[in-house]
Image (spheres, rainbow, N blue to C red):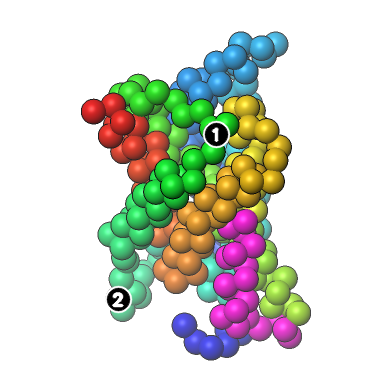
Amino acid sequence: MSELSQPMPGRGPHLKLALCFGVAGVIATLLLFPYLLAMMPLKFAMLRQPWWIVMLLQSAQSGVLCLLLGWIGLVLGTRYGLDAPWLRAWVYRQPRDPAARPHWFIGLALGMLAGWLVIAISRLLPHPAATAAAPSLGWAWRGALASFYGGFVEEVECRLFLASLFVWLLARLNRRRARPWTFVAAIALAALLFGAGHLPAAFVAGMKPAFLPISRIILLNALVGAVTGGLFWKWGLEHAMLAHFGADLVLHVAWPLAGSL
């Protein structure tokens, strides 16, 4: 990374790539629902509409959000080198730079390491109000399907959109130039908001609105967000997606399976 990053023209094609994010958002949300149905059965039982209608509506909404936020993130971020280069090359049939090599194994390993760190910290600092689901094979396959939501939807919304937006805003305060601290600050802000985005689900699950449990939820999830944000900055959105997917596999598949042994 250079010490100073000046904005580059961000006028390349983005809509077709954003459409791919939208389609992926619909599919990932559909795959999330078996996990949600098992996680919150009473919540779904209280719905006035059939659960499958809610599933279709939520999936459509997620797809539209991924399309719009993904497009905005590409417009704002590509000028500062924040992009999805491998997906872009595939979607637009563009040749890749021979010198640019993917680091898929490193990205996956870092994401899985972040997942185990979250588990370790949670075990060291357990929250008395937390109610973990009984580990089983049923939870494992549902968790595997739910991992696609984190890998695609949450990374488009929190890394591609939020991190790019913060870099763009901070760069405007510095004559439209982005220094390394700009990216670090943007990644940290996006990670904290990503952590805060998990609070509604925690409240639905019965967590009381107190300082310590709220801080715990935000910081543990922000740890994963910081790792994926760093990968997004260094190697592109695809590495962040893979790392997030790996972290969720640890949290929602490996850990439940280990507990069922």
Q: Is residue 9 at all visible to an observer of this figure?
A: no
Residue 120, compared with residue 239, is above or below; it is above
Part of the protein shown in magenta: 174-192
- Residue at 56% from the left image edge and 21% from the top image edge: 40
- Indicate the quadrant where residue 188 lies: bottom right
Q: Which mark is residue 186?
A: none
Image x and y of residue 113, in percent: 35, 55
- Residue at 34% from the left image edge and 74% from the top image edge: 100
- On screen, residue 95 versus residue 169, left or right, reads left
Q: Nearer the viewer, mark 2 or mark 1?
A: 1
- Is residue 187 or residue 13 the one in the foreground? 187
- Is residue 192 or residue 74 the one in the foreground? 192
State which tag comes first along the sequence, 2 or 1.
2
User: Residue tagged by mark 1?
Assistant: 128
- Residue at 40% from the left image edge and 23% from the top image edge: 134
Placement of the C terminus among the 4 image quadrants: top left
Image x and y of residue 93, in percent: 40, 61
**Is 4 inside the magenta-drawn segment?**
no
Between the residue at mark 2 and the residue at mark 1, the CA separation in whole angstroms equals 52 Å
Q: Which mark is residue 98?
A: 2
Residue 145, compared with residue 6, is above or below; it is above
**Is 175 inside the magenta-drawn segment?**
yes
